[in-house]
Image (cartoon, rainbow, N blue to C red):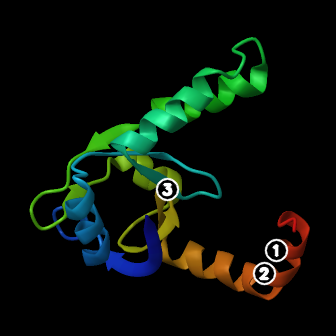
Amino acid sequence: MFYGEYSHTIDRKGRLILPARFREICKENGIEKFFVTRGLDKCLFMFNEEEWRVQEQKFKTMSFTKQESRSFNRLFFSGAVDVVPDRQGRFIIPQYLKDYADIKRDTVIIGISNRIEIWNGHAWQEFYSRSKDTFEQIAENIITP
């Protein structure tokens, strides 16, 4: 559903704008609300409400008797906040989430099919630079015919 890479900045009021293409997708699919939380690789994950419920169901089935499950769920769910972008697609990311992802001003927003990731602009460039040359090797290792 969400695809592409977009550079945006946090404005003086602390708002980030959802890329225009993502706003179009939201309008076409009746998406009004998102959940933003701590992601992996020091980025933020952003799910529409329907996808959030799907992920929530998956994580609720993890055994709470396992330390790793408890730790993951604590960090994932305690960081979650619901956001409703305004008419221009702007929304506020809480400071604790910006601190987690080291987001100051420049961001890169990427679509990863069922979720959106929000990155510190510099961190995304570092990740991309490290990963682009191994893209084919990664594909060979994880994609089975």
Quadrant containing the C terminus in the rendered view = bottom right
111 left or right of 69 in image: left
- Residue at 35% x, 49% y is 95
- Residue at 31% x, 69% y is 22
Q: Is residue 130 visible?
A: yes
- Residue labelled with disc 1: 139
**SS for tag 2?**
helix
Give the class, few, some or many, for how many residues have Cα within 10 Å of label 1's Cα (few <14, many ≥20). few
- Residue at 39% x, 67% y is 104
Quadrant containing the N terminus in the rendered view = bottom left
- Label 3 with label 2: CB-CB less than 8 Å: no
| 77 lies above or below 32 | above
Residue 128 picture quarter? bottom right
Percent across and percent down for residue 9 are: 31, 76
Task: Pick the residue in front: 64 or 71.
Answer: 64
Give the class, few, some or many, for how many residues have Cα within 10 Å of label 2's Cα (few <14, many ≥20). few
Amino acid of disc 1 = Ala
Amino acid of disc 3 = Asn
**SS for tag 1?**
helix
Task: Pick the residue in front: 31 or 64.
Answer: 31
Percent across and percent down for residue 114 are: 49, 56
Mark 3 or mark 1: which comes first in sequence?
3
Percent across and percent down for residue 70 are: 67, 22
Marks 3/1: CA–CA distance = 19 Å
Marks 2/1: CA–CA distance = 6 Å
What mark, if any, has residue 135 been given in the picture? 2
Marks 3/2: CA–CA distance = 21 Å
- Label 2 with label 1: CB-CB less than 8 Å: yes
Give the class, few, some or many, for how many residues have Cα within 10 Å of label 3's Cα (few <14, many ≥20). some
What mark, if any, has residue 114 been given in the picture? 3
**SS for tag 3?**
loop
Amino acid of disc 2 = Phe
